[in-house]
Image: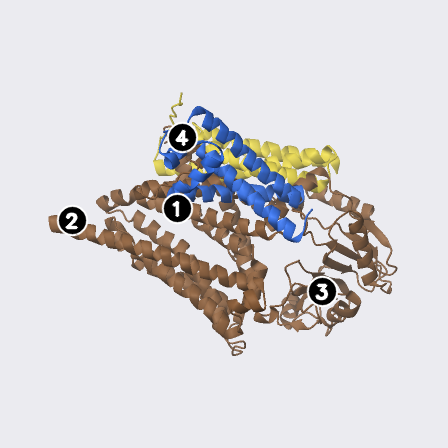
Chain colours: A blue, B yellow, C brown
Amino acid sequence: MLEGGAAALLLFAAIVANGVGMAWVALSMDVHWQQVQGTAPSRGAVRRLRVLGALGLACGLAACLRVDHASMAVLVWIMALSAAALVVTCTLTWRPGWLKALAWLAGCEARP
Amino acid sequence: MPRTFTIDTSGSPRLHIAARVGAAVLGGYGFAWGINAVTMALLSAAGLEFHDAEFLGNLLGVLAFLVVFLWTFAARRLWRVWAVLTSGGALLAGTGSWVQSWLV
Amino acid sequence: MFQSFRQAMAWLHTWFGLVLGFVLMAAFFFGALSVFDREIDRWAIPETRIAPQPMPSYEKLLRPAFERMQPTPLAIDAMRPRVDGPMPAHFDTVDSWSAYTTHRDPVLALYAGYQVPHAKDAEERIWAYATIDPRDGRLLPDEQLKIGSGFFFPLHYGLTLDWKNLGIWIVGFSALMMLAALVSGVIMHRKLFREFFTFRPGKAPLRSVLDLHNLTGVVALPFHFFFALTGLLIFASTYYFPLGETQLHGLHERHEQAEARETGLPHARADVSAGLANVDAMVAEAQRRWHEHGKAGEVGFLVLQHVGDANGYVSVYRAGTDRIALVGDGIHFKASTGAVIHEDPPATPVARVSEFLTGLHLQHFRHWLLRWLYVLGGLTGAACIATGFIFFVEKRKKQHAKTGNQGSRVVDALAVTTVTGMLIATLTLLIVNRLLPERLPAAWASRGDLEVYLFWAGWALAMAHAFVRSAPVAQERANPAWYEQCRTVSAMALAAVLLNWITTGDHLIKTVFTHPYWPVAGVDLFLLASAALATVAAHRLKARLGADQLAQSTEAGHA
C-alpha cells in the first residue's frame, strides 16, 4: 500500500493508461478508425490495436492494485474505465484528430 | 428465429396490462419472498451462520424478483405466470417454515 | 399484446422507466451529492468548518460530555404514553453511551440511551443526542439542518416520506426497476459493442438523444447495476424481506442466543453497581491489536454498554478507511476490569462478500479519486434517465401534435421539473441556508424545517413554471422552460457561492490558497462548474429555440 505523493502519481498513471488503452480499443473498431483516419484499417492494425488496448487497460489495473487494497483497486479501475470510455467518446465526437497521435504511437498509420 | 408470441387478448387490453403488472409486482414479490425463505432455512440447516444465510437469501430473492418480473412480461400465457408465481411462492415459503420447525 | 420478446422488453423499459424514472433521477442525483454529504454539512453549518478529528480521549473529554446529556423535553413527552406513572426528573440508569465519527467528520456525534422506569415494555429506552467539538468538548448547536447527511442522504433512499417507510419502499421498487431497465435495455440495444463509443450530436435530435441515452447507460453499466442492487441489499433484511423478524423469527432467535453464549457479552444489567476501568487504555489495546493485523487504527465507534453495572462492557470498533468492506473488527472489554472479553472473529467468506457489497455503496473508505468517480457515475445515471425522458418526448412529439394528444407535453414538463427543477430546489436550499437568520422567532418553524419547506416550495415553483410554459410542445416545438430554468440555475449557483462569501467570509482564494479548506472549496467549485455548464446549456437551448421560431415563421410565410 502506498501513501501520499507516490500513490497520487500512480493513480494518475492508472487513469492515463486506462484512457490510452480505451482509445486504442476504440481505434480498433472500423467506424472509429474511419472517423480518425478517413480510411479503413488494415487487418494487422486492428489486431495490434486490440492487443495494445488490452495491455493499456491491464497496466491501469496493475497500477491501481499497487496503490490500494485489492477490493478497492478493482473498484477504482472499473470506475476509471467508465470515465475513460466517456472521455474517448467525447474526443471522437468533437476532436477525432487528436487520436491520430495515439494511432501513430501504436505504430498504426493510415494507409495512403 | 424469433418466436411469435400469441398472447390471449380476450377482454380489454387495459385489463390485460393491469393483470400483467399485478402479476409482476405482487406475484413477483411473493415468489421472491418464497425463494428468500427457503434459501435462508435450507442454508441454516446446512450449518451456515444466520446472517450469512440471510444475506444469500436476500441476494437470491432480489435476483429472482428481477428474473420473474422480466419473465412475466415475456411469457406467452398470463394465467401460467400467475399460477407459477403464487403456488411456487407459497410452496417455497411453506418449505422454509417446515425446515425451520425441524431446526428450532 | 407483444409480438416478440424484444417488444415485451421494450414495453417494460419504456413504461416502467417513464413512471419510476422520476424517482430514480432523485435517487441518483441526491445519491451523487451524498458522496460528499459531510462536506456539504460543513458548507451549510459554518461553525463546524474545522479539520476532521480523531476520536478524542474518553477520560478527558467524552465522559464529562456524556454525563451532561439528558433527553430533550420533546423526547420525554413522546415517551409519556408508554409509561405507567410519572416521568422521572432525571434519567440515571444508562443503558448505553456511544460516540461515532468518520475520517471526514470534524464533529463528533454522541448517543445516550437510558432505561425508562415503569415503562410498559421493559426493553424501552429513551435517547438523547448531542454533537460536540472533539477538540474541547464544547456542545455544538444540534438543531441546524445537516443538509448533506441529514437531508440529501435520506432523500436519496427514502424521499423523506417517513410514513410507514413509504419512501423506502418506493425507492426500493424503483431500484428493482432500474435493474429491469438495464437488462431490458441491453436486450433492446442492437449494437451495444458496435456503438459503444458513439455520440452523434449532429444527427437528428431523436438519434443523438438515443446515442446519449445508450452511452450514459452502457459505459457506467457496472456502476448502475451494482448501486441499484447493493442499495436493495442494504435494506432487504430490515424492510423489503424482514424474514428474521417475521416468518423465520425462530431461526433468528436461536442465532441470537447462540451468539450471546459465544461472545460472552451480557444482554442485560446484573443490577450490581461496579466501577469503570480506564477506557483510554482499552482503546489503546484495541489499536495495538488492529495494528498487529496490519489494519489502520482509527476508532470509528465507541460503545459503553450497561454503564456503571457489573455486567458493563466497552466495545471499540475500527473506522474502516483502508478497504471497501464495511468492517468494525470490534474488540470488547469488561468495563470494570478492562480485560478483553471477546474479539470479533474474522468474517466468514459469505460475510466478506456481503461486507464488500454494502461497503462499496456506503463508502466509509478514504479514497478521494474513487469518491469523485462515484459522483461521475451517479450523474451519468441521472443523465441516462433524463435523456430517456427526452427520447420519449422526441419520439412522440410529432404524432401527438397531429392528434392533439397532450402526452408528450406533460412528460416534457415533468422532465423539466426533474432535471432543472431538481437543481433549482437544491440551490434554493443552499441559498436560504445562507440567508435565514441564525435565530428565528419562537413561533416559527425551526430553521432546519423552514429550509426543507423552502426546498420543496422551490421545486413546486419550478414545476408550475415548466407546466405553464409547456404549450409549444403540443405543437412540436421546444418548451422554453428548459432554457429559462438553465439560466435560473446558473444565476442561483453563482448566488450561492457569493452568499457563502458574504455571510462567512470564506471565498475561494481563502479556501483554496491562503487557508485551504477543501470541503467548502469543493462545494463552491462544484457550484461554479454547474453555473458554467448551465450557462452553456442555456446558450445552446436559446439557439435551438431561435431556429425553431424561424422555421415556424417561414412555414407560416409559405402558407
Mark 1 Cα shell of 10 Å, populated few (<14), some (14-19), many (≥20): many
In what element is the residue under mark 1?
Answer: helix
Q: How far apart are marks 1 and 2 (CA)?
A: 29 Å
Number of the front mark, 1 or 3: 1
Residue type, label 2: Glu
Q: Mark 1 points at which residue?
A: C387
Left or right of C276: which side holds B74? left
> First in sequence: mark 1 or mark 3?
3
Q: Which amino acid does label 1 sit on?
A: Thr
User: Disc 1 versus disc 3: distance between alpha carbons?
Assistant: 47 Å
* Chain label for disc 2: C
Chain where mark 3 sits: C
Which residue position holds label 3? C112
What kind of element bears circle 2? helix
Residue C212, picture quadrant = top left
For label 2, the residue is: C555
Amino acid under label 4? Answer: Asp
Q: Which of labels 1 and 4 is toward the front? A: 4
Same chain for labels 4 and 2? Say yes or no.
no
Q: Can residue C267 be seen in this view?
A: no
| Cα gap from disc 3 to disc 2, whole angstroms | 72 Å
Separation (CA) of disc 4 from disc 2: 41 Å
| Crowd class of label 4 (few under 14; some 14 to 19; many from 20; radius 10 Å) | some
Q: Which mark is residue A30?
A: 4
Q: Residue C13: image x %, image y %?
A: 42, 39
Q: Which of marks 3 and 2 is in front?
A: 2
Q: Residues within 10 Å of mark 3 (few under 14, many from 20)?
A: many
Which sits in the foreground, A14 or C220? A14
